[in-house]
Image: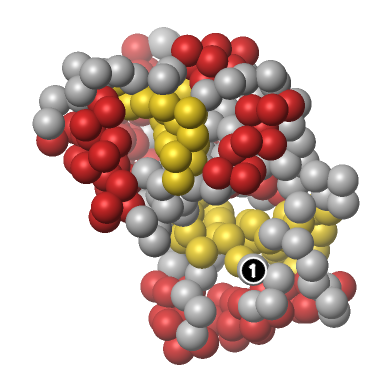
Amino acid sequence: MGTLFLVATPIGNLEDITLRALRVLREVPLVAAEDTRTARTLLKHYDISAKVVSYNEHNMAQRTPQILRALQTGDVALISEAGTPGVSDPGYELTVAALAVGHEISPIPGPAAVIAAISASGLPLRHFSFLGFLPRRTAERRRLLESVAEYRGTIVAFESPHRVRAAFADALATLGDRRIAVCRELTKLHEEVFRGIISEAIAHFTEPRGEFTLVIEGDTDAEPEVDDENLRAALRNLREQGISARDAATRVAREFRVPRRRSYALAIELEGPIVEK
């Protein structure tokens, strides 16, 4: 039984690939690629001779059984046009099909536009929600954005150049004029990371070009989605380290970004009244 390797490939700069990914691509008898032209450019750059077949949203229904047959006798590497397979790219369906018949799935981690964008955004990284590509239609796009309007974590989405200004307008209407990082052409020659607020992004990108990743600030007025049990566990852990209950309540409130009155109340519940000094 062969293994299906999910191999992350560069999102732009061909140097952004791991040694392990190159080894796997050299060793497998078959590479299934979302875009065979892009795949062959990468393989040629690294002098890799491998059999390549296409696997994309248009042919996955017919191609999946063929790849499963190939997995019966050897390993297969799946690569998307750029980044990590399955992240807004083909891969999920093949992964599920391979798991269903007993094949091992091995991720070969590497480039991912989502992680690259949030790391460079200057916005909080502790929690984020990835929306994938935003819907094409205005009404559907607004409904999706409205559904995360009270989400406290950072919001990440992909968008195409010919719809990105409409996406800015819908984000402004549904989320308000929040901070945003607009990451364009990441790792490529014309890489740009714009940081500002949504209205400023609208003014800046008058003729947008390239591939966009939007990183939008979460709702700073909403209380974060943190379970009381997690807060209690954190309070207990700090108390076991010898930290006073009063200081533990303050640190937990800061760490989890919850109102201090909430962590204070839980500390009282756990240990009795805290005497302020």
Q: State the SS at label 1.
A: loop
Residue 84 in the image, given as x and y percentages of width and height: 50, 38
Q: Quadrant of residue 196?
A: bottom right
What residue lies at 22% left-to-right and 42% top-to-bottom?
65
Q: Which residue is mark 1?
A: 160
Q: Which sits in the foreground, 60 or 220?
A: 60
Q: Is 189 placed left or right of 88 in the picture? A: right
Residue 99 in the image, given as x and y percentages of width and height: 19, 32
Query: Count the marks: how many?
Result: 1
Q: Quadrant of the N terminus?
A: top left
Q: Residues within 10 Å of mark 1 (few under 14, many from 20)?
A: some
Residue 59 in the image, given as x and y percentages of width and height: 36, 56
Q: Which sits in the foreground, 242 or 252?
A: 252
Examine the rendered structure and indicate whether residue 1 appears above or below residue 88: above
Q: Which sits in the foreground, 182 or 190?
A: 190
What residue lies at 27% left-to-right and 28% top-to-bottom?
70
Outermost bottom residue: 139
What residue lies at 55% left-to-right and 44% top-to-bottom?
36
Examine the rendered structure and indicate whether residue 46 appears above or below residue 161: above
What residue lies at 76% left-to-right and 36% top-to-bottom?
13
Q: Is 93 placed left or right of 21 in the picture? A: left
Residue 16 in the image, given as x and y percentages of width and height: 70, 28
Q: Is 245 placed left or right of 177 in the picture? A: left
Q: Which sits in the foreground, 142 or 75?
A: 75
Amino acid on which disc 1 is placed = Ser
Examine the rendered structure and indicate whether residue 73 appears above or below residue 113: above
Q: Is residue 230 visible?
A: yes
Q: Quadrant of residue 41?
A: top right
Q: Is 190 placed left or right of 115 in the picture? A: right
